[in-house]
Amino acid sequence: MEKTSAVEGARSPMQMKLGGEMEGNTNTLRTAETFLRLLPVGLCVSALVLMLKNSQQNQYGSVDYTDLGAFKYLVHANGICAGYSLFSAVIAAMPRPSTMPRAWTFFLLDQVLTYIILAGGAVSTEFLYLAENGNTDTTWSSACGSFAIYGYALAVFLVLDFT
């Protein structure tokens, strides 16, 4: 069985595949991955705070994100995504050897959370479309005409969610 040195054992999966080409870029790659994993934290927390504070009352009643299940789902998904992104950034920043099982675990969890956010965003976009335009076939009127501030905040929330 072949022995590996400590430097060789600390290589990332990308470095293992490319060999000696990326030998000096270990810290650069780790830093880049950490920052890329921290980026969704800011977006998710911004969208989360915006949606939690978004409510409006007028003579027609009140509206809040808890009134529709799709928005409650997306708020919870954003919280989970922010927590996972922070956790994965901490793990990625730690100077420990990267293994293929660890890389595959990150890849699969990244995919699962991406699809959870994408599904929630797609459903919420449909709700926003109905709130903005209504549906004359079923005699649903536009809700964003009566609750304009709430409708604009929903649009910003979805833009943050899809970025």
Image (cartoon, rainbow, N blue to C red):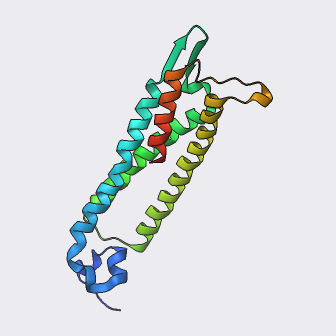
Instruction: Please tell me whether residue 51 is drawn above or below residue 81 in the rendered image.
Output: above
What residue sits 51% from the left and 24% below the top?
150
- Using the rendered image of the protein, determine whether residue 60 is visible from the camera's viewpoint: yes
What residue sits 33% from the left and 51% below the top?
38
Residue lying farthest to the right in this orientation: 137
The quadrant of the picture occupied by the N terminus is bottom left
Instruction: Please tell me whether residue 71 is drawn above or below residue 8 in the rendered image.
Output: above
- Using the rendered image of the protein, determine whether residue 4 is visible from the camera's viewpoint: no
What residue sits 46% from the left and 68% below the top?
104
Residue 105, image x, y percentages: 46, 64
Residue 110, image x, y percentages: 47, 58
Dividing the picture into quarters, in which one does residue 142 lie? Answer: top right
Residue lying farthest to the bottom in this orientation: 1
What residue sits 59% from the left and 21% below the top?
145
Residue 75, image x, y percentages: 50, 36
130 horizontally vs 90: left or right? right
Residue lying farthest to the top in this orientation: 59
Dividing the picture into quarters, in which one does residue 12 lie? Answer: bottom left
Taking depth in this image into account, of 144 and 63 the one nearest to the observer is 144
Residue 35, image x, y percentages: 29, 55
13 horizontally vs 71: left or right? left
